[in-house]
């Protein structure tokens, strides 16, 4: 083999290898859209949220395109994301676009969610055309979620500390040794009282069971006695209706007489109050009242003296009073 022919073959092999390498690089850089019919869409996102060029565009978990480029809008309030979608996949105008991640920490991609009940249906006019601009949804912000979770965790830790403090207070105050001892004693006493009540109820039940017939007889006798008393009361009322009528009539007559007497005594009371007559004078004149009181006192003293004389006469007799020498006066001069 000549050296020139060998060099030619080596050169051809290197050229073919480089061409294949270039094709592979182009294929991997362009992804599934390399050499296939596509159309472009402009998606306006509030934020890129870590989305990179060549990221996948998926619908129902199936890759349908790639992210071609991302650029910040002129006002700086949004991000324009250019995506390339395979021509065989048609997207309706009412579909929703949002950024999602593969797993918890996976790569970012754009998820296309068709409206419910409209996937693969509808007229051609309702489909997005090449170069259409659509509005994307706000992506899920992992950092905000972590901050919210951190706040919740802090709040939970604070709540747990307060709960632990409350439990310690309960253990130190309510569930101390003395309280538990008293509680156990109370439970024991309650159990004893319960047992006593059960025993008492059993005894009462036994007494009632053993005295059912006497109790029934007593109740029957009491009912008979009540009936007899009712009959007796009816008979007494029936037999004494005339007497009761006479008594009521007499009571009415007595009431009339008392009313008449009260009417007659009314002028006398008014005269006494006005000072008329002897009784009225006694009530009104202070001097006569004093003299009358003195007279009553003298009469009382005289009655007392007569009573003493009567008692002495009964004890000693009349002759003792007639012949009993009188004692000499105490103030007589001595001989």
Image (spheres, grey):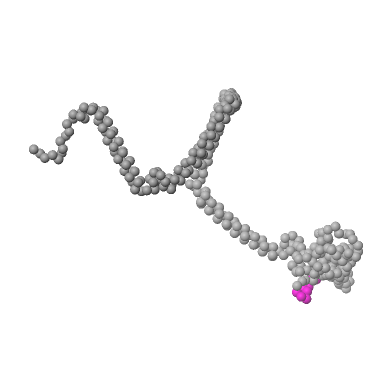
Q: Residue at x 42, y 46 (%)?
A: 276
Q: Nearer the viewer, residue 34 or 191?
A: 191
Is residue 283 shown above or below 48? above
Q: Residue at x 89, y 67 (%)?
A: 37
Q: Residue 223's image quarter?
A: top right
Q: Is residue 35 left or right of residue 167?
A: right
Q: Residue at x 29, y 37 (%)?
A: 302
Q: Residue at x 26, y 33 (%)?
A: 308
The spot of residue 116 in percent (x, y) is 83, 58
The spot of residue 72 in percent (x, y) is 77, 73
The residue range painted magenta reads 69-76
Is residue 33 shown above or below 220? below
Q: Residue furthest bottom?
A: 74
Q: Nearer the viewer, residue 185 or 72?
A: 185
The spot of residue 77 in percent (x, y) is 75, 72
* 73 falls in the magenta region: yes
> Quick check: can you spot residue 92?
yes
Q: Is residue 124 left or right of residue 171?
A: right
| Quadrant into which the C terminus falls | top left
Q: Residue 9's image quarter?
A: bottom right
């Amino acid at each position: 083999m000549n050296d020139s022919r060998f060099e030619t073959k080596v050169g051809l092999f290197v050229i073919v290898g480089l061409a294949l390498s270039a094709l592979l690089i182009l294929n991997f850089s362009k992804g599934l859209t390399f050499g296939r019919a596509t159309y472009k869409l402009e998606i306006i996102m509030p934020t890129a949220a870590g989305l990179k060029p060549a990221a996948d565009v998926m619908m129902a978990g199936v890759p349908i395109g790639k992210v071609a480029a991302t650029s910040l809008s002129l006002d700086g309030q949004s991000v324009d994301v250019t995506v390339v979608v395979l021509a065989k996949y048609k997207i309706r105008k009412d579909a929703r676009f949002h950024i999602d991640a593969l797993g918890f920490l996976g790569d970012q991609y754009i998820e296309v969610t068709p409206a419910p009940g409209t996937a693969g249906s509808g007229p051609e006019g309702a489909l997005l055309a090449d170069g259409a601009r659509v509005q994307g949804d706000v992506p899920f912000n992992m950092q905000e979620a972590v901050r919210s979770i951190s706040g919740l965790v802090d709040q939970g830790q604070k709540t747990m500390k307060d709960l632990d403090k409350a439990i310690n207070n309960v253990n130190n105050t309510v569930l101390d040794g003395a309280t538990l001892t008293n509680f156990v004693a109370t439970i024991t006493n309650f159990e004893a009282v319960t047992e006593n009540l059960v025993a008492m109820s059993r005894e009462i039940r036994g007494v009632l069971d053993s005295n059912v017939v006497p109790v029934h007889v007593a109740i029957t006798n009491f009912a008979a006695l009540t009936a007899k008393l009712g009959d007796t009361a009816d008979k007494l009322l029936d037999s004494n209706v005339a007497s009761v009528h006479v008594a009521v009539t007499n009571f009415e007559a007595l009431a009339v007489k008392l009313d008449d007497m009260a009417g007659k005594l009314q002028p006398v009371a008014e005269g006494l109050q006005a000072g008329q007559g002897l009784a009225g004078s006694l009530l009104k004149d202070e001097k006569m009242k004093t003299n009358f009181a003195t007279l009553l006192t003298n009469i009382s003293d005289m009655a007392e003296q007569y009573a003493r004389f009567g008692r002495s006469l009964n004890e000693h007799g009349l002759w003792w009073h007639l012949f009993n020498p009188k004692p000499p006066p105490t103030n007589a001069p001595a001989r």
